Amino acid sequence: MKHTILLYAIVLITAVPGPSQRRAAASEELPIARADAEKRILAVLDEVRKTGKIYLSVPVTDGRMLRLLAESAGAKTVVEIGTSTGYSGLWFCLALHRTGGKLTTFEMDPGRAATARKHFEQAGCGALITVIEGNAHEKLAELKGPIDMAFIDADKEGYVDYLNKLLPLVRPGGLILAHNVTMAAVKESYVKEVTANPELETVFYMDGGGLSVTLKKR
C-alpha cells in the first residue's frame, strides 16, 4: 500500500501541466481520431502477443504501467534502452500519440530492430519513433536532453552504466524506469544505486515483471 501511494504521488508530481502543455492540449486532434489511433495500436499489441512475435518483452501489466506513467506525466521525450521487437514501445505510443511526444529506442540486434520497425509502422506509429541500432552503452553519447522519461530493459549487468549516462539528460522531475528489478544482477547493483542516491526517490511496482520507478528530484 505504501508503494502504491508513493507511485501515485510521483505521477501527480510529474503531471502538473505548464502553459505550453495547456496550449498543446487545446490544439489536440479530435477525440474520435485519438480513439481510432488507440484501437490500431491495441490491435497490433494483441496480434503480436497472440502470434508470439515478442522477445524478452514486458508483460501486459507492465506495459499498461508504462503507458499510465508516460501519459500521466505528459511525457514529450521518452528514451528506451532495449527495443526488442517493439512491444513495450507500442505501449509507450498509446501515451505519446496523446501527449504529442516522441520515443527514441535503442536495439543492438538488427533483426529485432527490423521487426520492431514493422510493428511500429503497422500500428501507425512510425513517425513517433526513432530506432537506433547498435550498442546503447556507446550510442547514448549521441543523445541530447532534456528527457522526460527513460526506460531501461536491456543487458542487466549494464543497468548502472545506463543510469549514469541517462541521469544528466533526464530533466528534474523526470522519471527513470527499470525492468526486471528482482533479478540478482539488477537487485545487487542498480537497485542499490537508485535507493542510496539522495537526489532520487524510488518505488517498486511488483505486479508484473518487477518495475522500479525513480524520480529525479527537482
Image (cartoon, rainbow, N blue to C red):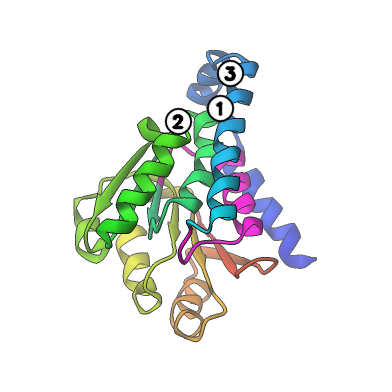
Question: Left or right: 5 with respect to 197?
Answer: right
Q: Mark on residue 33? A: 3
Tag 1 near tag 2, CB within 8 Å: yes
Q: How far apart are marks 1 and 3 (CA)?
A: 6 Å
Q: Which of 107 and 77 is in front in this view?
A: 107
Amino acid type for the residue under numbered disc 1: Ala
Element under disc 1: helix
Question: How many neighbours does mark 1 have within 10 angstroms: few (below 14), some (14-19), or many (20 or more)?
Answer: some
Question: Left or right: 172 with respect to 109?
Answer: right
Task: Residue at 43%, 43% (x, y): give it.
Answer: 119
Tag 1 near tag 3, CB within 8 Å: yes
Tag 3 near tag 2, CB within 8 Å: no
Question: How many neighbours does mark 2 have within 10 angstroms: few (below 14), some (14-19), or many (20 or more)?
Answer: some
Q: Quadrant of residue 28?
A: top right
Task: Residue at 69%, 59% (x, y): give it.
Answer: 6
Name the N-terminal-most of marks 1 and 2: 1
Give the x, y percent position of residue 100: 47, 28
Q: Which residue matches tag 1?
A: 37
Q: Nearer the viewer, residue 99 or 200?
A: 99
Can residue 58 be found in the magenta stretch?
A: yes
Q: Nearer the viewer, residue 90 or 206?
A: 90
Q: From the viewer's perspective, is residue 134 above or below residue 78?
A: below
Q: Where does the N terminus fall, quadrant-wise?
A: bottom right
Task: Residue at 59%, 53% (x, y): give it.
Answer: 50
Give the x, y percent position of residue 209: 60, 69
Name the N-terminal-most of marks 3 and 2: 3
Range of residues picked out in magenta: 54-78
Amino acid type for the residue under numbered disc 2: Gly
Of tags 3 and 2, the one toward the viewer is: 2
Amino acid type for the residue under numbered disc 3: Ala
Report if residue 102 is visible in the image.
no
Q: Which residue matches tag 2?
A: 124
